[in-house]
Amino acid sequence: MRQMSSVTVVGGGLAGCEAAWQLAQRDARVTLLEMKPQDRSPAHSGDNMAELVCSNSLRGASLSGAVGLLKEELRCLGSLLMRCADETAIPAGGALAVDRDRFSRAVDEAVSTHPLISVERKRLDTLPADGRMVVATGPLTDSEILQSLREHGAVLSYHDAIAPLISAESIDHTVVFRADRYEETGDGAVYLNCPFDEKSYMEFVRELVGADKTPLHEFETAPFFEGCLPIEEMAARGPLTPAHGPMKPVGLIDPRFGNRPFAVVQLRPEDAACTSYNLVGFQTRLTRGEQGRVLKMIPGLGNAVFERYGQVHRNTFVDAPRVLDDRMRIVSAPHVSLAGQITGVEGYVESIASGLFVGMAVAAELQGLDQDLPPPTTAIGGLIRHTRKTAGNYQPSNVVWAMIDHPRKKRGVRKRDHRLSAANTALEDLKTWMAHS
Ligand SMILES: Cc1cc2nc3c(=O)[nH]c(=O)nc-3n(C[C@H](O)[C@H](O)[C@H](O)COP(=O)(O)OP(=O)(O)OC[C@H]3O[C@@H](n4cnc5c(N)ncnc54)[C@H](O)[C@@H]3O)c2cc1C
């Protein structure tokens, strides 16, 4: 294939690395600009590109889940980041979790050594008037480049929060028990469970709701993302809300008493060596002092040592249906495409998918091809179509089955079987689309 014109990709995060890789694999020459290590967002701390800023989980692996299907589609489409995720996976029950350092190192190395990608560690502040460009600066895109984007249309935002990490050594193993929901208990299991009885749960929730929170200075009116609510916001909606949400005890038996606890906090390992653990679903905006006090009320965490405190952050995205066309190009500046979370997709896997789609779309455009969108029966097709939803009321979203065209479930068919069948259709349709793209 002839070598095509060059493209600048701004932001070496999940979407930017995937987009750069897809472009280069299709013979485009890519300059990838990444502002780390000179500049960092408040959530980034490592030097490698493709940093996972919070959880190390790429969520459910099963094809019956929309995100499981999306991951499988990305594998079929030759995603670099999925390959690196599979190579650096660590045990996580039914989820795909990775060793975050090995993952970002693997992506960084692959991208940096690609003969058609030149990585420049510098920051871009304004969008140039010409030159083909993909902007993938993420949900924490800062003021200068944001100002540039504002000139091209609506920029929206909401609040999001991350969960704390604690060191494995500080967990009291005489209290917590090892078990995966509905599955293995004991040594083979991945999760540690901190069991509550009703009394200790109610006291804990009371303290959680009353604890001091960090103020939301900027963007005071921006709402929280419903899929990632701080645990104290959830508890404020009703004392039993967390027990029906991330603290639900279903499928878990405490081996000390042979019964189901009233509620649990699940701890998921962060690395293959299990040296630190993430409090699953415990994203929080309590002040650090209050996290140290209240979260130590969790059974088994009385001496917890925090390796990272939970925190709240602003999350920026554009009003995609108004600002972007269906190939993610800015309508008023079509030499610029956006990719990743800034387009209003939500989550690591969704950001990778967005980067992959934009990389493919820009490559097709440079080759003078008119590529169809991926079929609406696929998860990636559904996700891209989500960004075409109602302008003015556009909300970011994880990939969900509601986005994917699939037949109604027949009576008597189990939901899981129904979705597995829809997933098989999606993968067939994707292969047909790939053969014609
Ligand atoms: C704090 C936080 C926690 C999150 N936790 C989770 C989670 O647990 N699970 C989940 O699925 N999703 C989570 N998300 C959401 C989302 O999936 C991730 O933010 C994801 O990394 C988004 O991918 P991206 O490529 O769009 O942006 P990023 O991965 O953030 O990449 C953006 C890159 O652009 C670089 N950059 C920014 N501006 C410039 C510039 N002007 N010039 C050059 N380089 C620049 C940055 O340094 C960064 O490397 C979280 C988001 C945040 C902010």
Image: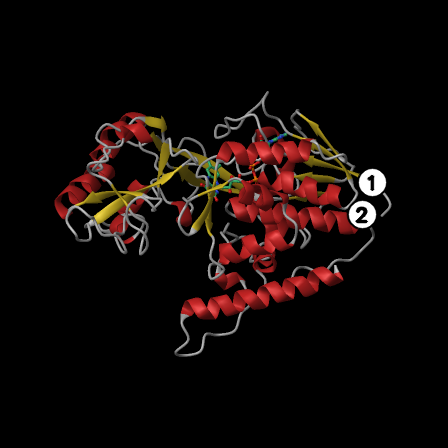
Image coords of residue 349 (percent x, y): 53, 47
Contact flag, marks 1 and 2 (Cβ < 8 Å): yes
Name the residue tied to disc 1: 5
**As shown in the figure, which amino acid type bears the numbered disc 2?**
Leu
Question: Tag 1, which secondary structure?
Answer: loop
Q: Residue at x 79, y 43 (%)?
A: 27
Q: Residue at x 56, y 25 (%)?
A: 47
Image coords of residue 141 (percent x, y): 56, 34
In this rendering, the answer to whether 435 lies above or below 112 is below
Q: Nearer the viewer, residue 121 or 184?
A: 184
Name the residue tied to disc 2: 366
**As shown in the figure, which amino acid type bears the numbered disc 1?**
Ser
Q: Quadrant of ligand 1?
A: top right
Whole-angstrom CA distance, mark 1 to mark 2, is: 7 Å
Most distant residue in the bottom direction: 411
Image coords of residue 35 (percent x, y): 62, 26
Most distant residue in the right direction: 2
Q: Residue at x 20, y 48 (%)?
A: 255
Q: Residue at x 47, y 57 (%)?
A: 62
Image coords of residue 90 (percent x, y): 46, 41
71 horizontally vs 243: left or right? right
Where the C terminus falls, by quadrant? bottom right
233 horizontally vs 225: left or right? left
Q: Mark 1: is the Cβ under 8 angstroms from ligand 1?
A: no
In this rendering, the answer to whether 82 lies above or below 294 is below
Say whether residue 364 is visible.
yes
